[in-house]
Image (tube, rainbow, N blue to C red):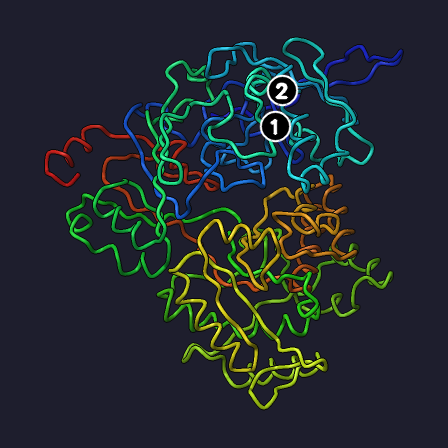
Amino acid sequence: MLARAAAIAILAAAPAAAQENVTVSHGYTNFGELKYGPDEVLAYVNPDAPKGGEISLATLATFDSFNPYARKGVAESTAADLVYERIMFSAADDPYGTYCYLCTTIEYPDDLEWLIINLREDVTFSDGTPMTAEDVVFTANLFLEQGIPEFRQAIGNFFSKIEATGPYQVRYEFGPDADFRTRVAQSGAWVAWSKAWFEESGQRLDDSADRPFLGTGPYVLDRVDMGRSVVYRKDPDWWGADVPSNVGRHNFDAIRIEAFLDQTAALEAFKAGEYTVRTPGSAREWAVDYNFPAVERGDVITETIPDGGIDAARGLAFNLRREKWQDPRVRDAVRMLFNFEWSNETLFNGLYERPYSVWGNSELAADGPPTPGELAVLEPLVAQGLLDEAILAEDAVMPPVSDASGNAPDRRTRREATRLLADAGWTVGDDGLLRNEAGETLTLSIIQFDANLDRVMNPFIQNLRLVGIDASLRRTDTSQYVELRRNRDWDLSNIIPGQGYEPGPGLVQWFGSETREDSSRNIMGLADPAVDSLIESVVVSDTLDDLRDRTRALDRVLRAHGFWLAQWENRDIWVAYWNQYGRPDPLPPLAVGLLDFWWYEAEKAEALRASGAL
């Protein structure tokens, strides 16, 4: 039976004359109790999972760097989860807990003005050198000095001091504006890199990298064909192999990633056995393309796995830095012209749901009219003139619903979209295009690098042109796409803005005014004082009830603002794989764990080879 871990309060000598109560624990949670005690095996893994073999997957992007923390280059990002490790970790069945991993215990006073992390003394980097407090402090400072600007802006004042107070002890002191609830989680979220390696290599965090940084993780880079494929191999001397929280995890000897330029080529390569696990790129693929002989023989397994996490809602963000998209009536009109009902029935085989919130499929999403708890947060903002009074009585904004009988939205929807555009000063000229008083046409450019999405975007563009919007699809390769986004040379661009169960300072990076001008997350350039105020209230929530109420209020305002066009989401996870792998059953609610806790079954693999299937 899993232990219910309670924090142990002890009396410790304070730096000043007075003493303070100090908690020593193996983990931390803001809400309730930790699910796991120290040195427990995770409940959702197979502790007897065999070790060995290879798992291989595809990615629909080329890459020219191994640094996902820089603006330069296009990164192969798998290394972040394979080669690096964080000081503390979260379990896939405990959304609010965080546990020591590279550490043994943490210490903190009741007011959390400071935090001490006591590091394990047996952690080594993959070159065999020990990880010490000096490396942890160096890594944190590297992020604070060379990390992307939006991160430094959001977190720069969070810590007032980070110092090594012993060979294996790090002390964090927090700035006056550091929110209480995220102090432990943010401190434990740092990865650990080798200070000596950075000094010897001259590598910078804000520059591209031709190899992963020296880390403590279970895998190391084996070989790479830059832009085409990369193989990570299990480190035979990995320090963490016998740590209880790693039992049943990191089971493969090798992990291979193959890059493809389009989904069709990737699917055909999977059918041919060039790689062995595929997460389908579209609903159409899942519905119609898995009837090839290997599936019929049982050599390829297809599984639909319910997703218990918050929806990863896909959509298109408006570039709010452009004046034409600053008018909410224009944004509303554009949203009306995406016909999800027709798209889902005709293009998605009825497999998708319509997103409605960045916290969809969770209790953090606003629903119906505001609750009393939400009103307590929203009413002061209305009184200050930061929000329209209507938000206090109206239901939370939901996406428009149209007729599935044809791509074009129904006449009622088109008339309403035309009316909104006219109210915003856009009228149709003799050439059928919308113009403003200055004679400028209402142009709209969607940037996209995935050719398989043309069948979704082109009907949407037809609908936009029906009402006079001069819409176009600009499809590029991955590198061009990244540059266009960085240069803000677009009107609509892909965004997946789904958030977590315990939102904190990361909300600033996504939706805060201070990141409007330079952010890889706030790509729309959202700047709204009401949103800023609500973010602040969410961040300082110290009870689960407050967190729910304030997050729902924020969600309600974000949805009313309409910074994005919500397109579709999948409430299931689809996986196809050659029948040589095993997995826990059931899976935890918050992770599928393909590279984490699945395993290779050698006898099944040999049977596939013997039959000529692979």
What residue is pinned by disc 1?
Answer: 190
For this orientation, the residue located farthest to the right is 17
For this orientation, the residue located farthest to the left is 611
x, y (%) of residue 111?
A: 79, 27
- In the rendered image, which quarter is residue 25 located in? top right
522 w.r.t. 124: above or below: below
Give the mark, 1 or 2, whose residue is nearer the N terminus.
2
- In the rendered image, which quarter is residue 459 located in? bottom left
* Pointers 1 and 2 in contact (C-beta within 8 Å): yes
Q: Tell which of 321 and 562 is nearer to you.
A: 321
Quadrant in which the C terminus is drawn = top left
Element carrying mark 2 = helix
Q: Which mark is residue 404?
A: none
Residue shown at 35%/43% (left/top)? 58
Q: Is residue 447 left or right of residue 248?
A: right
Element carrying mark 1 = loop
Amino acid type of the residue tagged 1 in the rendering: Trp
Amino acid type of the residue tagged 2 in the rendering: Val
x, y (%) of residue 489?
A: 59, 59
Q: Tell which of 361 and 132 is nearer to you.
A: 132
What residue is pinned by disc 2?
Answer: 136
Q: Tell which of 103 and 496 is nearer to you.
A: 496
